[in-house]
């Protein structure tokens, strides 16, 4: 593999040593939110949150065949998928990581909470990892490049698996004081990041509560827990991780980028527009990723709605001249 030339993106905040020292007392004081070292306890919790929902997906067909799937379960799962998924794509990614728009305080808090319900880690941790990914995309230093082991079939197979999920178990995490100093200064975001374990619990319990109340039965609560919590979390996780693995391995590349990011059309709807990944790496701060005809991007549509409602401003919409300059 011949790595692309090095580049540092303008939207990736970094700090010098003095700033890092000043921010030290602001950093949350629990788990990886403090020393950027993942503990064994956190690795075990991560394994459980990956493994148990995955087992639920494996059991989904026989469970559905056995009558444990109703319209209430489907609605709850879809609503939770849309809320938590757009919390990641609109909130964690386009807002907090790349500053594609500026939200009011209420929406900022709502997006941070919604994204936490996806159970993909605390918001500041998520942002730090993604900013580091952009700085070193598909080069040494990228937390999850599928090309890290080489370009042979065996190396790429190993790299795909690593980029999809194994990278999350690396004890040495992305330094938050270096990659997310702006968020460490935001007391709202720090509180929500610290509250991640409780928000993860809410994400798992809420569908069961909704199912029980809608059906007025323990059976309805149990099936909603299975579909709206376990299956929903597993599907959302693997769709999100596919952007790291699949979309950096295959796909069309109509725009110039310094990495191997590609557009994968069949992931567009479940990823809420994130799989139009080539344009995103060509123009990272752009609020819309699906910029060509027929490219569905529900995250961009939601940002458009928020702008119309007056909840956000300074949206970085695609600019024709910038797009043309980046065409291959």
Image (tube, rainbow, N blue to C red):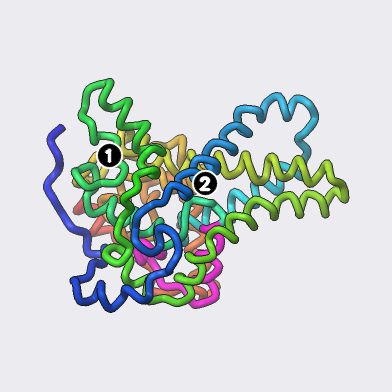
User: Going 29% across and 60% down the picture, which residue do you hit?
Assistant: 175
Q: Nearer the viewer, mark 1 or mark 2?
A: 2
Alpha-carbon neighbours of circle 1 within 10 Å: few (<14), some, or many (≥20)? some
Q: Position of residue 208 (x, y in %)?
A: 74, 49
**Pointer 1 residue:** 253
Residue extending furthest right? 216
Height in image: 320 above or below 275? below
Given residues 30 and 92, the one toward you in this image is: 30
Quarter of the figure with residue 180: bottom left
In terms of secondary structure, what is the magenta stretch mainly? helix
Q: Is residue 114 magenta?
A: yes
Q: Is residue 128 magenta?
A: no
Q: Position of residue 191 (x, y in %)?
A: 50, 71
Numbered marks: total: 2
Measure how far apart labels 1 and 2 are at the Cα level.
Answer: 37 Å
User: Going 26% across and 63% down the picture, which residue do you hit?
Assistant: 12
Q: Position of residue 220 (x, y in %)?
A: 81, 44
Quarter of the figure with residue 32: bottom left
Residue extending furthest top? 153
Given residues 197 and 311, the one toward you in this image is: 197
Q: Quadrant of the C terminus?
A: top left
Residue 328 at least partly seen: no
Quarter of the figure with residue 295: top left
Height in image: 278 above or below 213? above
Seen in the image, is 123 located left or right of residue 205?
left
Find numbered disc 2 in the image and state the secondary structure of the residue it sits on: helix
Residue 289 at least partly seen: yes
**Which region shows up in magenta?**
95-116
On residue 45, which mark appears? 2
Q: Quadrant of the N terminus?
A: top left
Find numbered disc 1 in the image and state the secondary structure of the residue it sits on: loop
């Amino acid at each position: 593999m011949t790595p692309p030339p090095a580049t540092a993106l303008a939207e990736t905040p970094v700090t010098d040593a003095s700033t890092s020292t000043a921010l030290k007392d602001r950093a949350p004081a629990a788990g990886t939110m403090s020393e950027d070292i993942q503990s064994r306890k956190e690795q075990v919790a991560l394994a459980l949150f990956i493994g148990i929902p995955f087992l639920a997906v494996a059991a989904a067909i026989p469970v559905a065949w056995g009558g444990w799937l109703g319209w209430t379960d489907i609605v709850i799962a879809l609503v939770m998928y849309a809320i938590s998924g757009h919390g990641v794509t609109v909130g964690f990614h386009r807002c907090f990581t790349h500053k594609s728009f500026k939200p009011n305080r209420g929406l900022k808090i709502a997006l941070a909470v919604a994204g936490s319900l996806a159970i993909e880690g605390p918001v500041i941790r998520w942002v730090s990892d993604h900013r580091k990914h952009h700085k070193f995309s598909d080069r040494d230093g990228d937390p999850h490049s599928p090309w890290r082991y080489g370009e042979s079939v065996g190396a790429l197979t190993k790299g795909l698996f690593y980029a999809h999920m194994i990278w999350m178990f690396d004890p040495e995490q992305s330094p938050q004081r270096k990659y997310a100093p702006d968020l460490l200064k935001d007391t709202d975001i720090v509180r929500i990041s610290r509250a991640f374990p409780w928000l993860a619990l809410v994400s798992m319990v809420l569908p069961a509560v909704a199912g029980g109340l809608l059906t007025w039965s323990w059976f309805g609560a149990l099936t909603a827990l299975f579909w709206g919590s376990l299956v929903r979390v597993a599907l959302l996780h693997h769709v999100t991780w596919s952007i790291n693995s699949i979309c950096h391995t295959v796909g069309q590349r109509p725009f110039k980028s310094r990495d191997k990011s590609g557009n994968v059309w069949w992931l567009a709807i479940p990823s809420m527009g994130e799989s139009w990944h080539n344009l995103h790496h060509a123009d990272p701060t752009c609020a819309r990723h699906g910029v060509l005809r027929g490219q569905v991007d529900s995250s961009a549509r939601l940002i458009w709605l928020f702008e119309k409602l007056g909840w956000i401003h300074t949206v970085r919409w695609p600019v024709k001249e910038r797009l043309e300059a980046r065409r291959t």
